Protein backbone atom coordinates (compact mmCIF):
# COMPACT_ATOMS: atom_id res chain seq x y z
CA UNK A 1 0.00 0.00 0.00
CA UNK A 2 1.26 3.45 -0.91
CA UNK A 3 -0.05 6.52 0.93
CA UNK A 4 0.79 10.13 0.29
CA UNK A 5 0.06 12.52 3.16
CA UNK A 6 0.11 16.28 2.56
CA UNK A 7 -0.43 18.67 5.49
CA UNK A 8 -1.56 21.90 3.94
CA UNK A 9 -3.42 24.68 5.74
CA UNK A 10 -6.15 25.29 3.17
CA UNK A 11 -9.01 27.48 4.40
CA UNK A 12 -7.34 28.64 7.62
CA UNK A 13 -4.00 29.22 5.93
CA UNK A 14 -5.63 31.14 3.10
CA UNK A 15 -7.22 33.49 5.59
CA UNK A 16 -3.98 33.82 7.53
CA UNK A 17 -2.01 34.64 4.39
CA UNK A 18 -4.44 37.42 3.51
CA UNK A 19 -4.33 38.80 7.03
CA UNK A 20 -0.56 38.44 7.08
CA UNK A 21 -0.25 40.46 3.89
CA UNK A 22 -2.39 43.23 5.35
CA UNK A 23 -0.43 43.27 8.61
CA UNK A 24 2.91 43.25 6.81
CA UNK A 25 1.89 46.13 4.57
CA UNK A 26 0.62 48.14 7.52
CA UNK A 27 3.85 47.44 9.41
CA UNK A 28 6.00 48.64 6.51
CA UNK A 29 3.86 51.74 6.04
CA UNK A 30 4.51 52.83 9.64
CA UNK A 31 8.30 52.78 9.27
CA UNK A 32 9.87 56.16 8.34
CA UNK A 33 11.38 55.81 4.88
CA UNK A 34 14.38 57.94 5.92
CA UNK A 35 14.90 56.07 9.22
CA UNK A 36 13.75 59.14 11.15
CA UNK A 37 16.61 61.31 9.89
CA UNK A 38 14.25 64.11 8.87
CA UNK A 39 13.30 64.50 12.54
CA UNK A 40 16.97 64.69 13.47
CA UNK A 41 17.40 67.40 10.84
CA UNK A 42 14.40 69.30 12.18
CA UNK A 43 15.73 69.20 15.75
CA UNK A 44 19.18 70.38 14.62
CA UNK A 45 17.58 73.24 12.72
CA UNK A 46 15.31 74.27 15.60
CA UNK A 47 17.84 73.93 18.42
CA UNK A 48 21.11 74.82 16.68
CA UNK A 49 20.04 76.63 13.51
CA UNK A 50 22.35 74.23 11.70
CA UNK A 51 22.05 71.58 8.99
CA UNK A 52 23.06 67.93 9.30
CA UNK A 53 23.71 65.49 6.49
CA UNK A 54 23.76 61.71 6.40
CA UNK A 55 26.37 60.66 3.85
CA UNK A 56 25.12 57.60 1.96
CA UNK A 57 27.15 57.76 -1.24
CA UNK A 58 24.75 59.97 -3.21
CA UNK A 59 25.43 63.10 -5.26
CA UNK A 60 24.45 65.21 -2.24
CA UNK A 61 27.67 64.15 -0.53
CA UNK A 62 29.78 66.09 -3.01
CA UNK A 63 27.64 69.18 -2.57
CA UNK A 64 28.08 68.95 1.20
CA UNK A 65 31.85 68.66 0.86
CA UNK A 66 31.82 71.76 -1.32
CA UNK A 67 30.02 73.62 1.47
CA UNK A 68 32.65 72.45 3.97
CA UNK A 69 35.48 73.64 1.72
CA UNK A 70 33.83 77.03 1.28
CA UNK A 71 33.46 77.45 5.05
CA UNK A 72 37.13 76.59 5.57
CA UNK A 73 38.20 79.42 3.26
CA UNK A 74 36.63 81.96 5.60
CA UNK A 75 37.86 82.92 9.09
CA UNK A 76 36.52 80.23 11.39
CA UNK A 77 33.91 81.29 13.91
CA UNK A 78 32.31 79.10 16.56
CA UNK A 79 29.12 78.74 14.54
CA UNK A 80 30.98 77.88 11.34
CA UNK A 81 33.00 75.29 13.23
CA UNK A 82 29.82 73.68 14.53
CA UNK A 83 28.36 73.56 11.04
CA UNK A 84 31.50 71.94 9.61
CA UNK A 85 31.49 69.30 12.33
CA UNK A 86 27.83 68.45 11.79
CA UNK A 87 28.51 67.91 8.10
CA UNK A 88 31.95 66.32 8.26
CA UNK A 89 32.48 64.46 11.55
CA UNK A 90 32.86 60.70 10.81
CA UNK A 91 31.81 59.75 14.32
CA UNK A 92 28.50 61.52 13.84
CA UNK A 93 28.02 59.70 10.54
CA UNK A 94 28.50 56.44 12.44
CA UNK A 95 25.78 57.54 14.87
CA UNK A 96 23.43 58.13 11.93
CA UNK A 97 23.94 54.52 10.89
CA UNK A 98 22.30 53.52 14.16
CA UNK A 99 19.12 54.98 12.70
CA UNK A 100 19.37 52.51 9.83
CA UNK A 101 19.98 49.64 12.24
CA UNK A 102 17.02 50.63 14.36
CA UNK A 103 14.86 51.03 11.26
CA UNK A 104 15.82 47.51 10.18
CA UNK A 105 14.83 46.18 13.60
CA UNK A 106 11.49 47.96 13.33
CA UNK A 107 10.85 46.48 9.90
CA UNK A 108 11.81 43.03 11.15
CA UNK A 109 9.42 43.32 14.09
CA UNK A 110 6.56 44.00 11.68
CA UNK A 111 7.14 40.87 9.62
CA UNK A 112 5.42 37.53 10.12
CA UNK A 113 7.45 34.37 10.50
CA UNK A 114 7.82 32.42 7.29
CA UNK A 115 5.65 29.31 6.85
CA UNK A 116 7.60 26.10 7.38
CA UNK A 117 7.47 23.55 4.58
CA UNK A 118 8.31 19.92 5.36
CA UNK A 119 8.58 16.80 3.23
CA UNK A 120 9.16 13.17 4.11
CA UNK A 121 9.36 9.93 2.15
CA UNK A 122 8.77 6.72 4.11
CA UNK A 123 8.88 3.21 2.69
CA UNK A 124 8.31 -0.39 3.82
CA UNK A 125 8.15 -3.82 2.14
CA UNK A 126 4.45 -3.35 1.40
CA UNK A 127 4.59 0.19 0.06
CA UNK A 128 5.68 3.77 0.57
CA UNK A 129 4.30 7.00 1.98
CA UNK A 130 5.10 10.54 0.88
CA UNK A 131 4.29 13.40 3.26
CA UNK A 132 4.28 17.13 2.46
CA UNK A 133 3.45 19.84 4.97
CA UNK A 134 3.14 23.58 5.46
CA UNK A 135 3.01 25.01 8.99
CA UNK A 136 2.32 28.57 10.19
CA UNK A 137 3.09 29.79 13.71
CA UNK A 138 -0.04 31.67 14.79
CA UNK A 139 1.59 32.85 18.02
CA UNK A 140 3.82 34.98 15.83
CA UNK A 141 0.67 36.53 14.34
CA UNK A 142 -0.91 37.22 17.74
CA UNK A 143 2.21 38.95 19.05
CA UNK A 144 2.81 41.03 15.92
CA UNK A 145 1.22 44.20 17.32
CA UNK A 146 3.22 43.90 20.54
CA UNK A 147 6.51 43.41 18.75
CA UNK A 148 5.87 46.43 16.59
CA UNK A 149 4.98 48.55 19.61
CA UNK A 150 8.19 47.55 21.41
CA UNK A 151 10.33 48.11 18.31
CA UNK A 152 8.70 51.50 17.71
CA UNK A 153 9.58 52.63 21.24
CA UNK A 154 13.16 51.40 20.78
CA UNK A 155 13.35 53.16 17.40
CA UNK A 156 12.18 56.43 18.96
CA UNK A 157 14.74 56.00 21.74
CA UNK A 158 17.53 55.54 19.20
CA UNK A 159 16.40 58.57 17.20
CA UNK A 160 16.40 60.74 20.33
CA UNK A 161 19.84 59.47 21.37
CA UNK A 162 21.24 60.23 17.92
CA UNK A 163 19.77 63.73 18.05
CA UNK A 164 21.31 64.23 21.50
CA UNK A 165 24.64 63.17 20.02
CA UNK A 166 24.29 65.99 17.50
CA UNK A 167 23.76 68.47 20.35
CA UNK A 168 26.69 67.03 22.31
CA UNK A 169 29.00 67.35 19.31
CA UNK A 170 28.00 70.99 18.86
CA UNK A 171 28.92 71.64 22.51
CA UNK A 172 32.25 69.85 22.19
CA UNK A 173 33.13 71.88 19.10
CA UNK A 174 32.28 75.18 20.80
CA UNK A 175 34.37 74.30 23.85
CA UNK A 176 37.32 73.25 21.68
CA UNK A 177 36.96 76.39 19.54
CA UNK A 178 36.90 78.82 22.47
CA UNK A 179 39.87 77.02 24.04
CA UNK A 180 41.88 77.28 20.81
CA UNK A 181 41.13 80.97 20.29
CA UNK A 182 41.96 81.70 23.94
CA UNK A 183 45.26 79.84 23.59
CA UNK A 184 46.12 81.89 20.52
CA UNK A 185 45.17 85.13 22.25
CA UNK A 186 47.14 84.37 25.41
CA UNK A 187 50.10 83.27 23.30
CA UNK A 188 50.32 86.79 21.91
CA UNK A 189 50.36 88.18 25.46
CA UNK A 190 52.98 85.64 26.51
CA UNK A 191 55.20 86.87 23.69
CA UNK A 192 54.84 90.41 25.02
CA UNK A 193 55.93 89.23 28.46
CA UNK A 194 58.93 87.47 26.92
CA UNK A 195 59.87 90.67 25.10
CA UNK A 196 59.60 92.63 28.36
CA UNK A 197 61.66 90.17 30.40
CA UNK A 198 64.20 89.90 27.59
CA UNK A 199 64.65 93.67 27.65
CA UNK A 200 65.13 93.56 31.42
CA UNK A 201 67.67 90.73 31.16
CA UNK A 202 69.66 92.49 28.43
CA UNK A 203 69.66 95.75 30.39
CA UNK A 204 70.84 93.92 33.49
CA UNK A 205 73.71 92.39 31.51
CA UNK A 206 74.81 95.81 30.29
CA UNK A 207 74.60 97.25 33.81
CA UNK A 208 76.71 94.43 35.18
CA UNK A 209 79.32 95.16 32.52
CA UNK A 210 79.18 98.81 33.56
CA UNK A 211 79.48 97.91 37.24
CA UNK A 212 76.14 99.47 38.25
CA UNK A 213 74.30 96.19 39.02
CA UNK A 214 75.27 93.14 41.04
CA UNK A 215 75.54 89.68 39.55
CA UNK A 216 72.84 88.53 41.96
CA UNK A 217 70.29 90.95 40.52
CA UNK A 218 71.39 90.13 36.98
CA UNK A 219 70.84 86.40 37.64
CA UNK A 220 67.35 87.13 38.96
CA UNK A 221 66.42 88.93 35.75
CA UNK A 222 68.02 86.23 33.60
CA UNK A 223 66.19 83.46 35.49
CA UNK A 224 62.85 85.19 35.14
CA UNK A 225 63.44 85.61 31.39
CA UNK A 226 64.38 81.94 31.03
CA UNK A 227 61.21 80.90 32.87
CA UNK A 228 59.13 82.98 30.53
CA UNK A 229 60.77 81.32 27.54
CA UNK A 230 59.72 77.91 28.90
CA UNK A 231 56.18 79.14 29.50
CA UNK A 232 56.07 80.53 25.97
CA UNK A 233 57.11 77.17 24.56
CA UNK A 234 54.41 75.47 26.62
CA UNK A 235 51.85 77.96 25.36
CA UNK A 236 52.84 77.27 21.76
CA UNK A 237 52.46 73.51 22.36
CA UNK A 238 49.05 74.03 23.97
CA UNK A 239 47.88 76.00 20.95
CA UNK A 240 48.93 73.21 18.59
CA UNK A 241 47.13 70.66 20.78
CA UNK A 242 44.01 72.81 20.91
CA UNK A 243 43.93 73.13 17.14
CA UNK A 244 44.36 69.38 16.72
CA UNK A 245 41.52 68.66 19.13
CA UNK A 246 39.34 70.91 17.05
CA UNK A 247 40.56 69.28 13.82
CA UNK A 248 39.48 65.91 15.17
CA UNK A 249 35.99 67.16 15.98
CA UNK A 250 35.69 68.83 12.57
CA UNK A 251 36.84 65.67 10.80
CA UNK A 252 39.70 67.51 9.07
CA UNK A 253 43.14 66.36 7.98
CA UNK A 254 45.86 67.29 5.52
CA UNK A 255 45.61 70.70 3.87
CA UNK A 256 42.15 71.29 5.37
CA UNK A 257 43.75 71.87 8.78
CA UNK A 258 45.25 75.20 7.69
CA UNK A 259 42.13 77.19 8.63
CA UNK A 260 42.36 80.53 10.37
CA UNK A 261 40.31 82.05 13.17
CA UNK A 262 39.97 85.52 14.74
CA UNK A 263 42.79 86.73 16.96
CA UNK A 264 40.54 87.31 19.99
CA UNK A 265 37.50 85.89 21.71
CA UNK A 266 34.12 87.62 21.45
CA UNK A 267 33.42 89.91 24.37
CA UNK A 268 31.28 88.76 27.25
CA UNK A 269 27.69 90.06 27.11
CA UNK A 270 26.82 92.77 29.59
CA UNK A 271 23.23 91.58 29.95
CA UNK A 272 22.65 88.49 32.05
CA UNK A 273 21.02 85.52 30.35
CA UNK A 274 17.40 84.75 31.20
CA UNK A 275 17.54 81.71 33.47
CA UNK A 276 13.98 81.62 34.78
CA UNK A 277 12.37 78.15 34.98
CA UNK A 278 15.56 76.66 33.62
CA UNK A 279 15.13 73.35 35.48
CA UNK A 280 11.65 72.68 34.16
CA UNK A 281 12.77 73.69 30.67
CA UNK A 282 15.64 71.18 30.82
CA UNK A 283 13.39 68.36 32.01
CA UNK A 284 11.00 69.06 29.12
CA UNK A 285 13.68 69.43 26.43
CA UNK A 286 16.55 67.06 27.27
CA UNK A 287 16.57 64.44 24.53
CA UNK A 288 18.53 61.85 26.50
CA UNK A 289 15.85 61.96 29.20
CA UNK A 290 13.15 61.47 26.57
CA UNK A 291 15.16 58.58 25.09
CA UNK A 292 15.34 56.91 28.50
CA UNK A 293 11.57 57.24 28.83
CA UNK A 294 11.11 55.51 25.48
CA UNK A 295 13.35 52.71 26.71
CA UNK A 296 11.20 52.38 29.82
CA UNK A 297 8.11 52.20 27.60
CA UNK A 298 9.66 49.45 25.48
CA UNK A 299 10.47 47.35 28.54
CA UNK A 300 6.99 47.91 29.95
CA UNK A 301 5.41 46.79 26.66
CA UNK A 302 7.66 43.73 26.56
CA UNK A 303 6.79 42.78 30.13
CA UNK A 304 3.08 43.11 29.42
CA UNK A 305 3.18 40.90 26.35
CA UNK A 306 5.36 38.33 28.08
CA UNK A 307 2.79 38.09 30.88
CA UNK A 308 -0.02 37.73 28.38
CA UNK A 309 1.55 34.89 26.39
CA UNK A 310 3.66 33.25 29.09
CA UNK A 311 1.78 29.93 28.85
CA UNK A 312 1.70 29.85 25.07
CA UNK A 313 5.04 28.95 23.55
CA UNK A 314 3.87 27.31 20.33
CA UNK A 315 0.61 27.48 18.37
CA UNK A 316 0.53 25.89 14.95
CA UNK A 317 -2.66 25.40 12.92
CA UNK A 318 -2.93 23.40 9.73
CA UNK A 319 -4.91 20.94 7.61
CA UNK A 320 -3.87 17.32 7.09
CA UNK A 321 -4.55 15.94 3.63
CA UNK A 322 -3.77 12.24 3.11
CA UNK A 323 -3.58 10.56 -0.30
CA UNK A 324 -3.82 6.77 -0.23
CA UNK A 325 -1.35 5.36 -2.75
CA UNK A 326 -3.39 2.19 -3.44
CA UNK A 327 -7.05 3.19 -3.61
CA UNK A 328 -6.26 6.83 -4.43
CA UNK A 329 -8.62 8.17 -1.74
CA UNK A 330 -8.06 11.53 -0.02
CA UNK A 331 -8.74 12.27 3.64
CA UNK A 332 -8.81 15.82 5.02
CA UNK A 333 -8.84 17.17 8.55
CA UNK A 334 -7.63 20.05 10.76
CA UNK A 335 -4.38 19.84 12.68
CA UNK A 336 -3.30 21.70 15.84
CA UNK A 337 0.21 21.89 17.34
CA UNK A 338 0.29 23.36 20.85
CA UNK A 339 3.22 23.80 23.22
CA UNK A 340 2.53 22.41 26.70
CA UNK A 341 3.92 24.70 29.47
CA UNK A 342 5.21 21.97 31.76
CA UNK A 343 8.68 23.35 32.40
CA UNK A 344 9.07 26.78 30.84
CA UNK A 345 6.31 29.17 31.86
CA UNK A 346 8.36 32.27 31.16
CA UNK A 347 9.39 32.70 34.81
CA UNK A 348 12.94 33.71 33.97
CA UNK A 349 11.94 36.10 31.19
CA UNK A 350 9.36 37.81 33.38
CA UNK A 351 11.73 38.27 36.29
CA UNK A 352 14.43 39.56 33.99
CA UNK A 353 12.07 42.04 32.36
CA UNK A 354 10.74 43.20 35.74
CA UNK A 355 14.27 43.83 36.99
CA UNK A 356 15.22 45.54 33.73
CA UNK A 357 12.15 47.77 33.92
CA UNK A 358 12.92 48.79 37.50
CA UNK A 359 16.53 49.47 36.54
CA UNK A 360 15.50 51.66 33.60
CA UNK A 361 13.00 53.59 35.71
CA UNK A 362 15.60 54.26 38.41
CA UNK A 363 18.21 55.28 35.85
CA UNK A 364 15.74 57.70 34.33
CA UNK A 365 14.95 59.17 37.75
CA UNK A 366 18.66 59.53 38.48
CA UNK A 367 19.22 61.23 35.14
CA UNK A 368 16.42 63.70 35.90
CA UNK A 369 18.01 64.47 39.29
CA UNK A 370 21.42 64.87 37.66
CA UNK A 371 19.99 67.18 35.01
CA UNK A 372 18.47 69.46 37.64
CA UNK A 373 21.73 69.55 39.58
CA UNK A 374 23.78 70.19 36.43
CA UNK A 375 21.49 73.00 35.37
CA UNK A 376 21.64 74.72 38.74
CA UNK A 377 25.41 74.34 39.00
CA UNK A 378 26.13 75.45 35.43
CA UNK A 379 23.75 78.42 35.66
CA UNK A 380 25.48 79.57 38.85
CA UNK A 381 28.93 79.13 37.28
CA UNK A 382 27.83 81.07 34.20
CA UNK A 383 26.75 84.07 36.25
CA UNK A 384 29.95 83.90 38.28
CA UNK A 385 32.09 83.72 35.13
CA UNK A 386 30.18 86.61 33.58
CA UNK A 387 30.73 88.78 36.65
CA UNK A 388 34.39 87.80 36.89
CA UNK A 389 35.05 88.74 33.26
CA UNK A 390 33.08 91.95 33.70
CA UNK A 391 35.12 92.82 36.83
CA UNK A 392 38.36 92.35 34.92
CA UNK A 393 37.04 94.53 32.11
CA UNK A 394 35.65 97.35 34.26
CA UNK A 395 38.08 97.41 37.18
CA UNK A 396 41.27 95.38 37.04
CA UNK A 397 42.36 96.15 33.49
CA UNK A 398 41.76 99.90 33.83
CA UNK A 399 43.62 99.92 37.16
CA UNK A 400 46.62 98.20 35.65
CA UNK A 401 46.59 100.59 32.69
CA UNK A 402 46.37 103.59 35.02
CA UNK A 403 49.18 102.21 37.15
CA UNK A 404 51.37 101.75 34.09
CA UNK A 405 50.60 105.28 32.93
CA UNK A 406 51.56 106.71 36.34
CA UNK A 407 54.73 104.64 36.48
CA UNK A 408 55.62 105.86 33.01
CA UNK A 409 55.17 109.44 34.22
CA UNK A 410 57.35 108.76 37.27
CA UNK A 411 59.97 107.13 35.07
CA UNK A 412 60.02 110.12 32.76
CA UNK A 413 60.60 112.31 35.83
CA UNK A 414 63.46 110.02 36.91
CA UNK A 415 61.50 109.05 40.02
CA UNK A 416 61.18 105.37 39.07
CA UNK A 417 63.64 102.84 37.76
CA UNK A 418 63.35 101.04 34.45
CA UNK A 419 62.86 97.65 36.14
CA UNK A 420 59.86 98.92 38.04
CA UNK A 421 58.41 100.22 34.79
CA UNK A 422 58.98 96.87 33.06
CA UNK A 423 57.40 95.05 36.01
CA UNK A 424 54.38 97.31 35.77
CA UNK A 425 54.06 96.45 32.10
CA UNK A 426 54.30 92.75 32.89
CA UNK A 427 51.59 93.08 35.52
CA UNK A 428 49.31 94.74 32.99
CA UNK A 429 49.91 91.95 30.49
CA UNK A 430 49.28 89.27 33.13
CA UNK A 431 46.00 90.93 34.05
CA UNK A 432 45.02 91.01 30.38
CA UNK A 433 45.89 87.32 30.20
CA UNK A 434 43.63 86.54 33.15
CA UNK A 435 40.86 88.53 31.46
CA UNK A 436 41.21 86.38 28.35
CA UNK A 437 40.97 83.21 30.45
CA UNK A 438 37.91 84.57 32.27
CA UNK A 439 36.30 85.34 28.91
CA UNK A 440 37.14 81.83 27.68
CA UNK A 441 35.58 80.32 30.80
CA UNK A 442 32.39 82.27 30.26
CA UNK A 443 31.90 81.03 26.69
CA UNK A 444 32.77 77.44 27.62
CA UNK A 445 30.32 77.44 30.54
CA UNK A 446 27.67 79.03 28.34
CA UNK A 447 28.08 76.20 25.82
CA UNK A 448 27.81 73.65 28.63
CA UNK A 449 24.66 75.31 29.95
CA UNK A 450 23.01 75.20 26.55
CA UNK A 451 23.72 71.47 26.46
CA UNK A 452 22.44 70.67 29.95
CA UNK A 453 19.47 72.98 29.40
CA UNK A 454 18.49 71.19 26.21
CA UNK A 455 18.35 74.30 24.06
CA UNK A 456 20.13 77.58 23.23
CA UNK A 457 20.09 80.56 25.55
CA UNK A 458 18.50 83.76 24.28
CA UNK A 459 21.08 86.00 22.56
CA UNK A 460 22.45 88.82 24.70
CA UNK A 461 24.11 92.13 23.90
CA UNK A 462 27.90 92.09 23.81
CA UNK A 463 30.02 94.21 26.07
CA UNK A 464 32.33 96.87 24.63
CA UNK A 465 35.87 95.65 24.23
CA UNK A 466 38.29 96.03 27.10
CA UNK A 467 40.33 98.57 25.15
CA UNK A 468 37.29 100.85 24.99
CA UNK A 469 36.66 100.84 28.76
CA UNK A 470 39.90 102.30 30.11
CA UNK A 471 39.06 104.41 33.13
CA UNK A 472 41.11 107.58 33.51
CA UNK A 473 39.76 108.71 36.86
CA UNK A 474 40.71 107.12 40.14
CA UNK A 475 38.21 106.03 42.75
CA UNK A 476 37.24 103.24 45.10
CA UNK A 477 37.52 99.76 43.68
CA UNK A 478 34.14 97.96 43.56
CA UNK A 479 33.88 94.38 44.76
CA UNK A 480 32.56 91.54 42.65
CA UNK A 481 28.92 90.72 43.26
CA UNK A 482 28.10 87.38 44.90
CA UNK A 483 26.52 85.02 42.41
CA UNK A 484 25.37 81.93 44.32
CA UNK A 485 21.75 81.13 43.52
CA UNK A 486 19.43 78.71 45.31
CA UNK A 487 16.25 77.07 44.14
CA UNK A 488 16.48 77.69 40.40
CA UNK A 489 13.22 76.48 38.86
Image: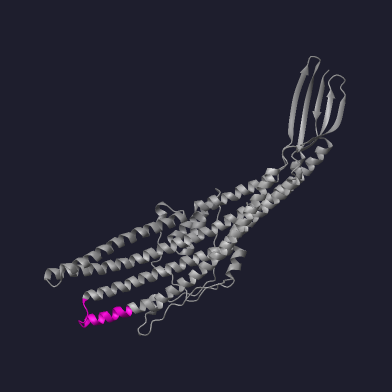
Q: Residue 296, position in %: x, y?
A: 65, 54
Residue 27, how many percent across, how many down?
Answer: 71, 48
Quarter of the picture holding the N terminus: top right
Judging from the image, the colouring scheme is: one colour
Q: Is residue 287 left or right of residue 436?
A: right
Which residue reaches farthest top? 125
- Rendered view: 197 above or below 86: below
In the picture provided, is 419 more to the left or to the right than 22?
left
Residue at 86% from the left image edge and 22% from the top image edge: 328
Q: What is the quadrant of the C terminus in the image? A: bottom right
**Rendered residue at 74%/36% (across/down):** 115
Q: Nearer the viewer, residue 169 or 197?
A: 197
Question: How many numbered dots are placed on residues in this image?
Answer: 0
- Residue at the (32%, 80%) spot, across then down: 402
Q: Is residue 288 visible?
A: yes
Q: Main secondary structure of the magenta part?
A: helix
In the rendered structure, the answer to whether residue 34 lies left or right of residue 469 reads: right
Q: Is residue 462 covered in magenta?
A: no
Q: Is residue 313 above or below residue 295?
A: above
Q: Is residue 342 left or right of residue 294?
A: right
Q: Is residue 323 above or below residue 374?
A: above
- Residue 103 x, y percent position in the rendering: 64, 49
User: Which residues are drawn in magenta?
Assistant: 401-417
Residue depicted at x 33% and y 66%: 188
Amino acid sequence: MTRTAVRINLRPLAGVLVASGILALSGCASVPHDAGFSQVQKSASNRLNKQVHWAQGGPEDRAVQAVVQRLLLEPLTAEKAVQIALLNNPGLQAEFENLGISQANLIQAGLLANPVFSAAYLYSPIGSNTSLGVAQDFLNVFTLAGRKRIATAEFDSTRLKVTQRVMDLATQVRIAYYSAVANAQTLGLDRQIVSSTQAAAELAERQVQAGTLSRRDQYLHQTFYAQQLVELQNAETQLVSARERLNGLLGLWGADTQWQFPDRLPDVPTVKAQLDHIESYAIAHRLDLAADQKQVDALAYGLGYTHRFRYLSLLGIGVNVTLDGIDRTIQRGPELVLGVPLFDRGQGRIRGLEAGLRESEQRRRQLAVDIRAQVRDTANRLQSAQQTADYYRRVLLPLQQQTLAENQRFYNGMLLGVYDLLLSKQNEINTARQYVLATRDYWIIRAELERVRGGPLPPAANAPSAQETVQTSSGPVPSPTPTHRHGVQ
